Amino acid sequence: MADAGVPVLMDALGDATSITYTPATGDAVTLTAIVGAETTEEDEVIDGREQKLIRAVSIHTDPDSTWGGVASPALTAMVTIGGVQYAIESIGSSDENWHTLNLTRRGKVEVSRRGYRR
């Protein structure tokens, strides 16, 4: 009975466009997942500023389901969404039907200064 809402959620919110879970060893798995919006944080690093892009994604736990799934996601795996690769920073929550993965990717930030370009 606990999984009765899964088809409704996946039909309404599921995104099947190019979502791939790739473990450190083994074969990649194509998934339908519920993908959250990407948020941005900036960090000061030695070389300047770095942008940290954060996104949550909920995946099914059953690899044999209609939507694909991962029974035990690993922090060493990568998730690709629409051709953009993310590292798994943490596993936010897990139950018998869902894993919520907290994903991140990093990039440099260019800073402009007053009068820099004339």
Image (cartoon, helix red, strand yellow):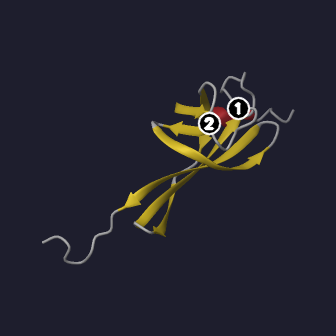
- Please indicate whether residue 43 sits to the left or right of residue 102 in the image: left
**Which of 108/102 is in front?**
108
Q: Secondary structure at mark 2?
A: strand
- Residue 60 numbered tag: none
Q: Position of residue 65 (x, y in %)?
A: 72, 24
Residue at which label 2 appears: 33
Q: Position of residue 36 (x, y in %)?
A: 58, 48
Q: Position of residue 85 (x, y in %)?
A: 50, 41
Q: Quadrant of the C terminus?
A: bottom left
Residue at which label 1 appears: 70
- Can the viewer see residue 102 in this picture? yes
- Please indicate whether residue 87 sits to the left or right of residue 65 in the image: left
Q: Secondary structure at mark 1?
A: loop
Badge 1: residue crowd in 10 Å (few <14, some 14–19, many ≥20):
some
Q: Which callout, 1 or 2, points at the residue further toward the start of the chain?
A: 2
Task: Looking at this view, name the residue that lies furthest to the front.
Answer: 46
**Which of 10/18 is in front?**
18
Residue type indicated by callout 2: Ala
Q: Quadrant of the N terminus?
A: top right
Mark 1 and mark 2: span between their CA atoms?
Answer: 11 Å
Badge 2: residue crowd in 10 Å (few <14, some 14–19, many ≥20):
many
* Figure check: 64 above or below 50: above
Q: Residue at x 52, y 52 (%)?
A: 38
